[in-house]
Image: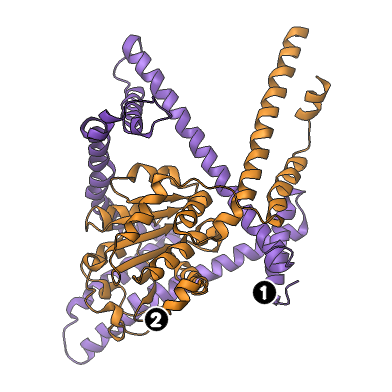
Chain colours: A orange, B purple
Amino acid sequence: MRFFELLLRIDRRWIFLFVGVAVAAPLFMHRDLKIDVTPEARGIYDAVEALPPGSKVMFAADYDPGTAAELQPMAVTFLKHAFGRGLRVIIVGLWPQGPQQADLAIAEAMREPGVAARNPQYGIDYVNLGYQSGNEVVIQRMGSDISAIFPRDYRGRPLEQFPIMKGVRDLTAISYLFNVSAGDPGTLQWVQFAGDRFHVPIGSGSTAVQAPQIYPYWPQQLTGLLGGMKGAAEYEAISGFRGKGTVYMLSQAAAHLVVILFIVVGNLAYFLTRRKGSAGGAP
Amino acid sequence: MSLDFGVWLGAFLTLGIISFLYKDNPVYKVCEAIFIGVSAGYWFVSLFWQNIWPKLVLNLRDVVTALVHGHGPGGGVVYLVAGVLGVMMLMRLLPKVGWISRWPMAFIVGATAGLYFITYLQSNALEQMKATIQAPLITAEFYKHLWPPPPFNPYWNPLLVFVGTFTGLVYFFFSLEHKKAVGVTARIGILFLMVTFGASFGYTVMSRMSLLIGRLDFLLGDWLHLVR
């Protein structure tokens, strides 16, 4: 009993240390956990696989470096998957740093041998239209005229220069939209405006915090959903592109075990010491 | 170990912020102040060059040029209205005429409400009601796969969603006293709500751990080159 009383008085910094070690130690181990692919992740994979080569897909990068740890692996895997299938990717962002994150993801995707062999060209196979402020109003406008809201690309060049934009007047020219979302604006707005209004099939990769909010849209309004790092690892597993999501899963699992252990032990200690206090009688 | 100054700076700032876990200290305060300052500066510059300059200043310049050349302002007058509304919003900074800012605020509230009224009804009410009601009753696959029972059988999930939605709504229905059948249903609704909150908490923990993993990977990998 004394042990449990001590546990209840433990300095919270010990807990931080335990969690820190649990997260760091697996990074030194070169072992992958077995990852089961859920129907949510399979939905995105299947939707991309179903597209014929040359189809134009939109990658909406609505996140920033703060959430890159869990979202960047999804972005990289999607781009590897899309380029590997010969799809053409149009990148947009409703978050200022989203298109920059997309550029980093493209650089990483290009290092994949299957993608490097195809050697996707800027302006032909992909284009980055950059950030546009206005949240849902931007999507609404894209429904009637994309060039009206994105007249130039990320580097200030007119869209008419790029062969990929030929025939792309509005969202109806987009065969699939993959949104990586860290919050608002994000998947909610893409579903409401691009999906439900303009009938663009959408897949979403969202932060784990946001995933419970997004789940109600699957499977009717979203073809698939990647929730947090686990979602990224699932997408990597099913597409065969091993990346950071898979590497991080061992750390994630170890950290969860430590948290669960502390919750169980903490509750046990609390109830046992409370019972002892009741048995002793109040003064 | 990295030779990149940017990586060293990032590592210093990361360690400075993490040092708060031990206790509040001057290094943490410096890192926090840098973060807030850089964020404010970034947003100011970003919003100026993404919004005010291209969407207001350049368009107003075109309106003025057209007027100088004896043409009418044309469609550009809408930017004039937007500019005036923007200035009216800034009146909030002057206490004596602060009430003027209520006009552009009313415009924003009205426009946003109008924009979202239909979309929310469509996406968050009608579409999801349809999915909730149709899924368990119409899918033929469900009737073929009744065994094993939930939670071991994903075919039962749509029915669970239906029951969870219905009982959850009953819990928030206060026109009837929560007794007898209504009370039992509401009680089941609470259970579903508790499971939902638990799942949300679990996802939140996963998200926070992911951020920690990302930072430690940066420190141990990009900075110290100890892991790859």
Please state which amino acid type lies under the numbered disc 2: Tyr
**Front residue (pair B82, B18):** B18
Name the image quarter holding residue A57. bottom left
Disc 2: host chain: A
- In the drawing, does residue A95 fall left or right of residue A143? right
**Front residue (pair B30, A212):** A212
| C-alpha separation, residue under disc 2 versus residue under disc 1 | 28 Å
Residue B44 spot, x, y in % from top left: 49, 70
Q: Are callouts 2 and 1 both on one chain?
A: no
Residue B81 spot, x, y in % from top left: 26, 70
Which quadrant, please, contains the C terminus of chain B? Answer: bottom right
Image disc number at residue A122: 2
- In the drawing, does residue A44 fall left or right of residue B130? right
Name the image quarter holding residue B12. bottom right
**Front residue (pair A257, B80):** A257
Pointer 2: residues within 10 angstroms few (<14), some, or many (20+)? few
Q: Which residue is mark 1?
A: B6
